[in-house]
Amino acid sequence: MFLKNCWYVAAWGHEVAGDGLLSRKILGEQVLLYRQRNGEAAALIDRCSHRFAPLSKGRREGDYVRCMYHGLVFNADGLCVEEPGRDQPSDNTSIRSYPLVEKYKMLWIWMGDAQRADPSLIPDCHWQDDPAWRSIPAYIHYEADYRLIMDNQLDFSHLSFVHENTLGGSRKIAETVPTLEAIEGGIRLTRWYLNEPEIAPYLRGVVDLKGAIDRWHIYDWFTGGNVLNMDSGSAPAGTGAPQGHRAPQSLQFHATQCTTPEDEHCSHFFWTYAHNFNLNDPAFTKALAGRIEIGFVEDREMIEAQQKVVDVSGDDKMAFISVDLGLTQGRRLLNRAIAAEQAAN
Ligand code: FES
Ligand SMILES: [Fe+2]
């Protein structure tokens, strides 16, 4: 079950380049992404109206895509503009197109009712192209239901265990109860770990912050498009970070994570981990992204293994424990939004 009337990330902008035809399954539908001559990206169903050949086996011709089975040509709106051997294309040859917006280096697609595709609903992810921050666009494919990824994001107690030697730190992370607030379209979670003995393992050797720290994860999770935006960082302990003062030695990061269901079983995970210091040090940006990726691979391995067990567990009920407040609230919001959308149809 998916929420349809919202913007999902379909691809990074750089994945669709030149004459390229990118085929990607989104919410169970095979979508073709390409660029027109002016650089504007377009999304069509990856299925020719004639004999259902995939258009991704076709070729881009200027602003159009030609099916390379029997030669029908489609424009960016899905209109069939040429049928070999006829002046006008036959009836019913047009195909579906999807609203697509390029913003924050990402291509955002609207899989639901096109009339409702309002670009102002795209969550703010400006850290990805703001000159005050640096990050590297990254992608991970998951063989898991997007909701297990969402559960993981809404429960950081797993950092102490899944990421014991990477993104984690002391057991204090697992023992911390986050503050939960309702925000427009989602939830905000705030987690502080004061007076931790040292920086997290993933930062060791790449930054220079010694001694005890105050560390935080403050993040917004949006139901529409499963978008997570997180302010996180570490400051020398006792320098007033929880009160909003970020001492000059503080390390501040901004993570963006967007999870797009591929289908009922698999998911696309687009992420960045931006930093606002060492701005002119691409080697640092790369090293940081590499460390984070190791952590995200740990997540993927755990969640894909979990999915296999969930698949054979039928209707058996999972236990509810104290760290589940965030994910319970997230699931509730999502289920409510899906029910409301289905009731309106
Ligand atoms: S299948 Fe595309 S033109 Fe025939
Ligand atoms: Fe994780």
Image (cartoon, rainbow, N blue to C red):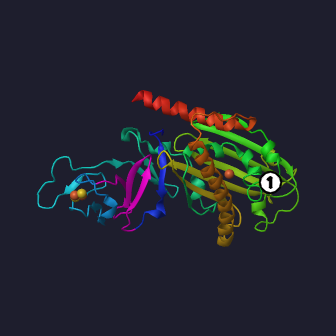
Question: Residue 37 colored magenta?
Answer: yes
User: Tag 1: residue type?
Assistant: Gly
- Of residues 6 and 162, the one nearer the viewer is 162
Magenta segment boundaries in residue numbering: 18-47
Q: Secondary structure at mark 1?
A: loop
- Of residues 227 and 162, the one nearer the viewer is 162
Q: Is residue 129 visible?
A: no
Residue 15 x %, y % = 46, 63
Which residue matches tag 1? Answer: 169
Question: Residue 251 colored magenta?
Answer: no
Q: Residue at x 68, y 58 (%)?
A: 295
Q: Residue at x 51, y 33 (%)?
A: 337
Tell me if mark 1 has few (under 14), some (14-19) or many (20+) residues whose alpha carbon lies within 10 angstroms of its own. Answer: many
Is 112 on the left or on the right of 246, as rendered? left
Q: Residue at x 77, y 50 (%)?
A: 160
Q: Is residue 224 above or below residue 50?
A: above
Residue 270 x %, y % = 55, 55
Is 132 on the left or on the right of 62, as rendered? right
Quarter of the view holding residue 68: bottom left
Q: Is residue 316 above or below residue 168?
A: above
Residue 273 x %, y % = 64, 58
Q: Quadrant of ligand 1?
A: bottom left
Quarter of the view holding residue 111: top left
Q: Residue at x 32, y 63 (%)?
A: 57
